[in-house]
Image (cartoon, rainbow, N blue to C red):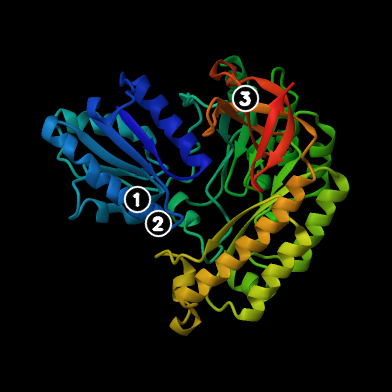
Amino acid sequence: MYLETYGCQMNINDTELMEGLLVDRGFVRVDEPETADVILINTCAIREHAERRVVGRIGELQKYRYENNDLVLGVTGCMAQRLGDQLLDGGPAVDLVAGPDAYRALPSLIASIQENAVERGQSLLTLDEAENYEGVTSVRGKGVSAWITVQRGCDHRCTFCIVPYVRGSEKNRDPLAVLDEARAAVAQGYSEIVLLGQTVNSYQAQGQDRRWDFTRLLKAVARLDGVRRVRFTSPHPNDVTEALLEVMAEEPSVCRQLHLPVQSGSDQVLKRMVRRYTAESFLDKVDLARSVVPEIALSTDVIVAFPGETEADYEKTLDLMKRARFDDAYLYKYSLREGTPATRFPAADFVPDEVGSARLARLIGVHRDIQREINQAEVGQWREVLIERPARSKDDLQGRTESNKIVAFPGDPSQIGEYMSVRLTGTTGATFMGVPW
């Protein structure tokens, strides 16, 4: 089997889950599609561009059918859930589609197709409110971080977001199972744990374990033997509490880095997005985070040109960015997703494409200027770096600091997975160059 992943960290972890289920049934993973009898593409549905890439990739993979008539080609994940049988009708041939709650059934379905017990063109698209994949052993990839999903789905209904419709409502895992998985990851050699959820800090265990909220879970993971770093993504601003921030300040292994998606600096736009906070209350959370965790690094998500966004609304977003001064930001022009409430806004509300592109370009410029100032102030400092991979620059390695900033510095690939003290010698604005101790 050959597995290919598009999208977020949760998709990476879902691929690891699928591999665990398939390996348990005797499948063996290969590194190249030409040697595979089964090819699965695990997909993202957040943006149209990602889906176009997947459709193109499905077309490219058809060539392997000429060499292997028995090849089973499947599409899994959020795009499969969103488009469903559309992926099976017309276009490049797909033998199965499976949504995020259907992975347990994949091995049997693939085997049935291979044995000609069922026809090709099967779909597994039922959302299961109880499916947390407890008891499934993930086969982790070659990275240095262990991704652990603690929450699936989402109870928010932001009007721009497809996630609740392709992953269902919020489902939180058993905290003791999460701790067991973290211990197992440590035993496999991982020292950085990343806790995943759509709004991860709204985590609340069910049943008798309701005393477990995200703050308690984070602290428990941080105190496990062998855990050197803990991160989490992606939190919702409304669920950032002083208690959570105190754990970040007090627990040595919890990284002083927080992703706070703001999406817009305009209250009017935030209301249309159904974000359930105002720009000012968001900035209050920024101030709280910096007061409780003084050296915290903050990042965010922003969408420009959301339907109804006026020039005045856009200027408010620029103002918020200048006030918050994020260390990093993921900036996007609004992308309409079929099936989301935002598609029902009046046509006149949609911002012309060229206007949206201009707004995005200006926002990127503002953010980069701020980021450059922040990072230049760090040049000359020593930082502990977890080495992740070879860098693009010749003979260099690449790693991340506790604050999630990328550093390239001289080293040998044999050091990947190690921690090293590195002096930051310069910055391109977004990343650093350094020299090791």
Q: Residues within 10 Å of mark 3 (few under 14, many from 20)?
A: some
* Residue 212 can be seen in this image: no
Which disc, if any, is residue 53? 1
Horizontal and vertical percent position of residue 112: 20, 31
Instruction: Please tell me whether mark 3 sits on a helix, a strand or a loop.
Output: strand
For the residues marked 2 and 3, what is the alpha-carbon distance in whole angstroms? Answer: 35 Å
Residue at the image point whose x is 26% and y is 52% from the top: 87
Q: Is residue 246 above or below residue 28?
A: below
Horizontal and vertical percent position of residue 181: 58, 24
For the residues marked 3 and 1, what is the alpha-carbon distance in whole angstroms? Answer: 34 Å
Left or right relative to 174: residue 355: left
Disc 3 marks a residue whose amino acid type is Pro
Q: Which residue is mark 3?
A: 410
Instruction: State which quarter of the image contains the C terminus.
Output: top right
Q: Residues within 10 Å of mark 1 (few under 14, many from 20)?
A: few
Disc 2 marks a residue whose amino acid type is His
Q: Which residue is mark 2?
A: 49
Instruction: State which quarter of the image contains the N terminus.
Output: top left
Horizontal and vertical percent position of residue 97: 29, 44
Left or right relative to 251: residue 436: left
Which disc, if any, is residue 356? none
Residue at the image point whose x is 63% and y is 40% from the top: 206
Q: Nearer the viewer, residue 47 or 104?
A: 47
Disc 1 marks a residue whose amino acid type is Arg
Q: Residues within 10 Å of mark 2 (few under 14, many from 20)?
A: few
Q: Nearer the viewer, residue 189 or 165?
A: 189
Q: CB atoms at circles 1 and 2 under 8 Å apart?
A: yes
Instruction: Please tell me whether mark 1 sits on a helix, a strand or a loop.
Output: helix
Camera-nearest label, 3 or 1: 3
Q: CB atoms at circles 2 and 3 under 8 Å apart?
A: no
Horizontal and vertical percent position of residue 179: 64, 26
